[in-house]
């Protein structure tokens, strides 16, 4: 008679504090296993799923952090309104075979007396999102550094939609000798082309239609690039014209930059990114495209 084999699927362990996280991650490394980290603020959607699946495919164990980080929100931003569906997020982690879910409270992450900040500086951190959201990248860099120091993962996974964040994190991981490889995964899009974001849930049907001008403008720029256009200003103008066709959309910026330095370019090259930030009603959306790549084809199932 066949014997029943035990279910070997790893079970999700919820961890609430840095000491336990460090102990468990140390144990994973001591066993000779590789570790992937997926930092998130929860409200997990198909974009996060892709990051988790990539980590699961490339690493022996995966830790997902779920923490709505107060230090990266400005006073007029949506920290209080940010969605926090923790039970659903933990169910997603279980479904995807995540090993550890790190869910610290604000008081655990930033205890009484906390007075250290990681401050990325220079064009990379001070332009575009950095200029419009003062202190934002300090908050991101501080929390990501804390996660890297505690978990010491072999790889950490980020979505390309937040392109400037990816560049800042890549820089800090190198500058602070963390030894962690920063893996940037393609933007996941809904079937209509809108880049997935936890903030999309706030768009009503009419606003969502207006928002589609963003991927449409990027697609137009990509088509022009593929036809040989290399003048960055011409590409920028094209994007602005396309966005202007959506009257409900207020453009914050359109920029064509070098993907590593985030300095504006005049001639397009293979490592350029076209960035858009725009507001629709009370919702601010960002999107990015590296022209000439397949990234625009990374359409997800939504969520
Ligand atoms: O991209 C995010 O969700 C956040 O900025 C991050 C990287 C989890 C840091 O709080």
Image (cartoon, rainbow, N blue to C red):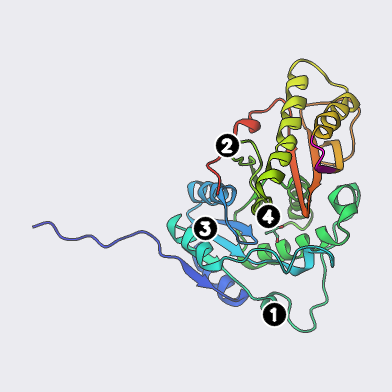
The mark lying in front, picked from 2 and 1, is 2
- Earlier in the chain: of badge 3 and badge 4, it is 3
The residue wearing badge 3 is 62
Residue 294 location, x and y as percent? 63, 28
In terms of secondary structure, where does tag 1 sit?
helix
Dominant secondary structure of the residues highlighted in magenta in the image: loop
User: Considering only vertical position in the picture, is 164 above or below 34?
Assistant: above
What separation in Å lies between label 1 and label 4 (alpha carbons)? 28 Å
Residue at 69 percent across and 80 percent down: it is: 107
- State the residue position of label 2: 191
Quadrant into which the N terminus falls: bottom left
User: Which residue does the numbered mark 1 point to in the structure image?
Assistant: 107
Query: Closer to us: mark 3 or mark 4?
Result: 4
- Measured Cα–Cα span from mark 2 to mark 3: 28 Å
Q: Which residue occupies the extreme bottom position in the image?
A: 112
Magenta region: 246-250
Question: Considering depth in this image, is 19 or 299 the residue closer to the camera?
Answer: 299
297 in relation to 72, above or below:
above
């Amino acid at each position: 008679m066949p014997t029943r084999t035990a279910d070997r699927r790893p079970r999700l362990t919820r961890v609430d504090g840095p000491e336990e996280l460090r102990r468990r991650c140390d144990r994973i490394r001591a066993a000779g296993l590789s570790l992937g980290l997926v930092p998130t603020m929860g409200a997990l959607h198909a974009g996060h799923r892709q990051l988790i699946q990539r980590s699961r495919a490339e690493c022996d164990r995966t830790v997902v952090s779920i923490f709505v980080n107060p230090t990266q929100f400005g006073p007029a931003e949506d920290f209080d309104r940010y969605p926090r569906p923790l039970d659903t997020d933990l169910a997603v982690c279980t479904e995807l075979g995540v090993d550890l879910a790190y869910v610290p409270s604000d008081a655990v992450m930033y205890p009484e007396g906390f007075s250290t900040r990681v401050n990325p500086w220079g064009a990379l951190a001070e332009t575009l999102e950095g200029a419009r959201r003062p202190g934002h990248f300090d908050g991101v860099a501080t929390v990501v550094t804390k996660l890297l120091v505690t978990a010491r993962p072999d790889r950490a996974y980020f979505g390309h939609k937040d392109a400037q964040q990816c560049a800042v994190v890549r820089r800090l991981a190198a500058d602070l000798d963390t030894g962690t490889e920063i893996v940037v995964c393609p933007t996941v899009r809904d079937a209509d082309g809108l880049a997935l974001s936890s903030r999309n849930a706030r768009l009503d049907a009419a606003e969502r239609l207006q928002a589609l001008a963003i991927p449409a403008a990027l697609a137009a720029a990509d088509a022009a690039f593929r036809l040989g256009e290399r003048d960055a200003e011409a590409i920028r103008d094209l994007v602005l014209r396309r966005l202007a066709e959506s009257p409900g959309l207020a453009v914050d910026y359109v920029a064509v930059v070098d993907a590593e330095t985030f300095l504006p370019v005049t001639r397009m090259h293979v490592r350029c990114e076209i960035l858009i930030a725009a507001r629709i009603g009370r919702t601010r959306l960002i999107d990015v495209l590296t022209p000439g790549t397949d990234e625009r084809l990374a359409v997800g199932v939504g969520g």
